[in-house]
Amino acid sequence: MKKFPTDFIWGSATSSYQIEGAAQADGKGPSIWDAFSHIPGRVQGNEHGDVACDHYHRMKDDVQMMKALGLQAYRFSISWPRILPDGTTKQINQAGIEFYNQLIDELLANGIEPWVTLYHWDLPLALDMEKDGWLNKDIATYFADYARVCYQYFGDRVKNWITINEPWVIAMLGYGQGIFAPGRVSNREPYLAGHHIILAHAKAVKVYREEFAHQGGKIGITNNCDWREPLTDSVLDKTAAQRALEFFLAWFADPVYLGHYPETMVERLGDRLPRFTDEEIAEVKGSSDFFGLNHYTTMLASDAGGELLQGGVYGNGGLSEDQDVNLHVDPTWEKTSMGWAIVPWGCQKLLEWIHHRYAGPAIVMTENGGAFPDEMKNGVVDDQDRLAYVRGYLGACHDAIENGVQLKGYMLWSLMDNFEWASGYAKRFGIHYVDFETLERTPKASALWYREVIERNGVEE
Ligand code: PNW
C-alpha cells in the first residue's frame, strides 16, 4: 500500500459550463461558450451545454453522491455571467448568488470543503463582444471586480480560491488554434491574452489579500502541463524538451514564482511577447499561495531544426514553430480516448521539475483523470481502464512525495461525465456515468475504488 501524508486532501473536480446547464435560467447572461457551442461545426455533433448534466437543478443529489464517495474536497467553478450577466458589476444576479450559496452550504453541511475556481472559461459574452475579452488589458479590472463580488458573498465560507483555470488552454486553444471559444486563430494573440490573464490573476489576488485577509483563505492559480521527455539523449533534444516545458508551464509559472518570463520565450517571440512594468511584476511575483496543476499526459520532444512535422495530437502542438520543437508519442504507449498517452512516470518527472524550478512550492493536483470508452452493461460500468490510469498516476504522485515534492492534494477529473468542450458529450471523463437522455448518474467501478483510496488514504502498489 502506498500511503499518503495524513493531511493529504482527496477531491474531485468539475466546471460550471461543463455540468450546470440552465444556460438561460434565472437571469444568467450568455457566455462565450454558449455562443461558440451554438455555431454549427465547432463542437462534435453540434452539442452544447444548454442542459449538460443539469447540475443546476440536481445540485443537492449531486452533493449526496459526493458524500457517498467520501470526498473531502470538491472543486467547482462559478459561472461569471450567472453572477454578473454582462460581466460588469452594473447588475448582480441574486438568483446566481443564491445557487452558489446553497451549493456551498450543502457541501459544508456534508463535510466537504469547497475549492472554488473563479474562471473556468465561460467569459461573459458581452465582455468579448464589447471589450475584446482577454485581448483587452481592462479585462484585469473586470475580473478583479467580479472576484471581489465572489469574495464578498462567498468568502465567509470558501477558504480555497483558484483564480483562473489553465491559462495555456485559454490562450493557445482559444486565441491560437481557435478550437475553443472565442475561436480566434493567431500567432500573436495567445501571448497578449496570456499576458492579460497573468495580470488579471494578480489583480484578483491583490484584492483578496488587501480587502479580505480577515477571511483567512488561500488563493492561487491553476496551470496545466504535460510532461515533455527528450526523444533522444542528444543535447539538442534535451534542450528542446526543456524549451517545450518553458513554453507550456514556465510561460505562466515563471512570472508568478520568479518574476519574469522565461528567457527562451523573450528571445524567440520578440515583440509578440508583451513586457511587464516594474509595478505589474511586483503584483505578479508571489501571487500564488499554492501551485495548482492539471496534468494528463506526456509526449516526446525533439529539436525541429527548422523542419516541423505536420499534425500532432489534439491541442498539444502549441505554436510549435515558435518553439522549434517536434512532438511524438511512443507507439507502445497506451492511450485514452482523447488520444492522450498514459505515462505515469511523466507525472512524477513533472512534479519533480516543478519542485526544483520553483523551490519546493506547495502543489495541489487540481485535475487528473482520463476519458475512456465506457459502456453501461446491466446497470454496471466496469471502467478498469480508468481505474488503472488513476492508480498509476496516484502511484506516481506518491513516489514524487517520497522524493520531497510538496504535493498537498489530488482532485480527480471528473466527478461525472460532462460536456467535454469541442468533443461534446462523446468523451467521458467521469467516475460517475451520466445517461444524457435521463440524466441519471451511476457510480462506475472507478468511483467505488476511489472511495476506498480515500478511506485508506492510500493506493495499492
Ligand atoms: C482541462 N490540451 O482541459 C480542463 O480544465 C477541463 O475542463 C477538461 O474537461 C479536462 O482538462 C479534460 O480535457 C484541457 O489540449 C483541454 O492540452 C485541452 C488540453 C488540456 C486540458
Image: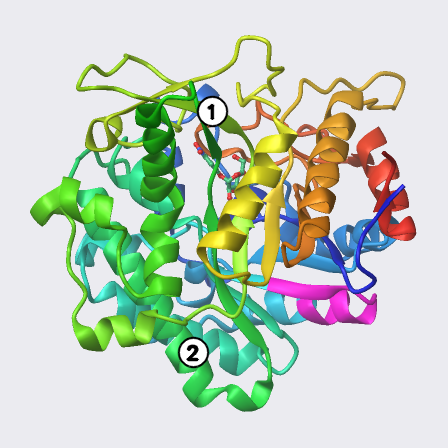
Q: Quick check: 59 above or below 424?
A: below
Asked if residue 275 lies left or right of residue 238, the reply is left
| Residue 299 badge | 1
For marks 2 and 1, give the CA distance. 39 Å
| Residue toward you, 107 or 412 | 412
Q: Quick check: 338 above or below 101?
A: above
Which residue is at 86% across, 53% downward?
Answer: 70
| Residue toward you, 427 or 232 | 232
Give the image quarter of residue 431: top right
Is the residue marked by circle 2 packed among few (<14), some (14-19), or many (20+) residues within 10 Å? Answer: many
Q: Secondary structure at mark 1?
A: strand
Give the quadrant of the N terminus: top right
Q: Quick check: 86 above or below 215?
A: above
Is the residue marked by circle 1 packed among few (<14), some (14-19), or many (20+) residues within 10 Å? Answer: many
Chain-order first, disc 2 or disc 1: 2
Q: Amino acid at mark 1?
A: Met
| Residue 148 badge | 2
Q: Amino acid at mark 2?
A: Arg
Eye-nearest disc, 2 or 1: 1
Please provide the residue range marked out in magenta: 104-115
Q: Is residue 171 visible?
A: yes
Residue 262 on image: x %, y %: 27, 51
Residue 37 on image: x %, y %: 40, 34
Which residue is at 18% across, 44% downward?
Answer: 189
**In the image, is residue 302 part of the stretch drawn in magenta?**
no
